[in-house]
Image: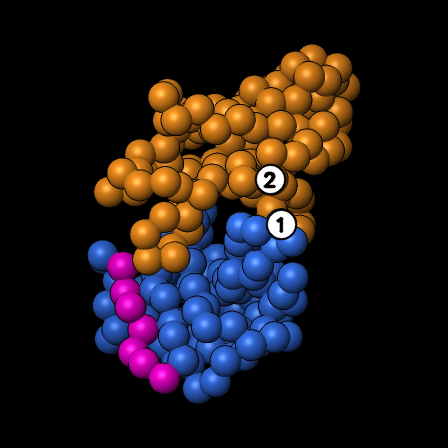
Chain colours: A blue, B orange
């Protein structure tokens, strides 16, 4: 299993500013994933972050808006840039872990609840 | 393209009644399918995965490749089962995508 700590757990930000969310994992992982969960919606994958290379962004998400760092195998940050009220969401960090008997499982941080005013 | 469909946003049942949360998927290869659950004020966590064919908290889910479904079932719902349930698919690129979620409300 993997234990993920996300900071901050919540924040209220002014439009036009930026917020950096940190994700720390208690074990080394190759890939880290960032998701967004808008109010009343499901989880949408923003990007996959690999250590030592640029993040891979999903359709509809761009690096200028959501820059990601992955300096080592246990840590990543997601920045929400030039925020607008539409960016108000829960942002989740996730990693994969192997499970006994085969297969994989996704582990999640507790999320960062962002409100943009 | 990978897609997960959960047609019901809300499912409300009485305690002791059977529960079935529907999930259909679209994927050209052999997917890994999961059910994740989020209880109130807790983080999202794995409930069960098709590969292990296990029963967790009385819930089971069978992968039906012909119908491309992975419905979650429990014969007798309990109040503590009230939560948000997400069906998820792990396919190409090691990415996990999620359905829209179904909120299960078990009434006393």
User: Magenta stretch mostly in which secondary structure?
Assistant: loop
- Mark 2 touching mark 1, by CB under 8 A? yes
**SS at mark 1 in the image:** loop
Which residue is located at x 69 percent, y 13 percent?
A: B17
Res A79 seen here? no
**SS at mark 2 in the image:** helix
Whole-percent x, y for residue B62 in the image: 53, 26
Whole-percent x, y for residue B107 in the image: 71, 20
Residue bounds of the magenta highlight: A52-58
Frontmost residue, A78 versus B68: B68
Left or right of B80 on screen, residue B49: left
Which residue is located at x 47 percent, y 40 percent?
A: B33
Are marks 2 and 1 in one subunit?
Answer: no
Which residue is located at x 45 percent, y 77 percent?
A: A77
Question: In the rendered image of this protein, does residue B37 appear above or below residue A59?
Answer: above
Q: Residues within 10 Å of mark 1 (few under 14, many from 20)?
A: few
**Quarter holding residue B88:** top left
Can you tell which mark lies on residue A101?
Answer: 1
The residue under label 2 is: B52
> Label 1 lies in what chain?
A
Whole-percent x, y for residue B39 in the image: 66, 43
> Label 2 lies in what chain?
B
Task: Examine the structure image and report whether residue A54 is included in the region drawn in magenta.
Answer: yes
Distance CA(mark 2)–CA(mark 1): 8 Å
Left or right of A115 on screen, residue B4: left
């Amino acid at each position: 299993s993997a234990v993920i700590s996300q900071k901050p757990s919540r924040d209220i930000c002014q439009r036009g500013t930026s917020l950096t969310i940190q994700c720390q994992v208690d074990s080394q992982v190759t890939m880290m994933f960032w998701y967004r969960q808008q109010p009343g919606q499901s989880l949408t994958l923003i990007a996959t972050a690999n250590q030592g290379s640029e993040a891979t962004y999903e359709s509809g998400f761009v690096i200028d808006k959501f820059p990601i760092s992955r300096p080592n195998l246990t840590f990543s940050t997601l920045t929400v840039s030039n925020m607008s009220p539409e960016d108000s969401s829960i942002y989740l960090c996730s990693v994969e872990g192997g499970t006994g008997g085969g297969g994989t499982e996704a582990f999640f941080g507790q999320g960062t609840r962002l409100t943009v005013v | 393209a990978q897609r997960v469909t959960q047609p019901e946003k809300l499912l409300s049942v009485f305690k002791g009644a059977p529960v079935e949360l529907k999930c259909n998927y679209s994927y050209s290869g052999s997917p890994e399918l999961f059910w994740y659950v989020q209880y109130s004020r807790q983080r999202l966590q794995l409930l069960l995965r098709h590969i292990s064919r296990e029963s967790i908290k009385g819930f089971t889910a069978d992968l039906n490749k012909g119908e491309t479904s992975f419905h979650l079932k429990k014969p007798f719902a309990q109040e503590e089962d009230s939560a948000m349930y997400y069906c998820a698919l792990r396919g190409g690129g090691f990415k996990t995508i999620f359905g829209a979620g179904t909120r299960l409300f078990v009434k006393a």
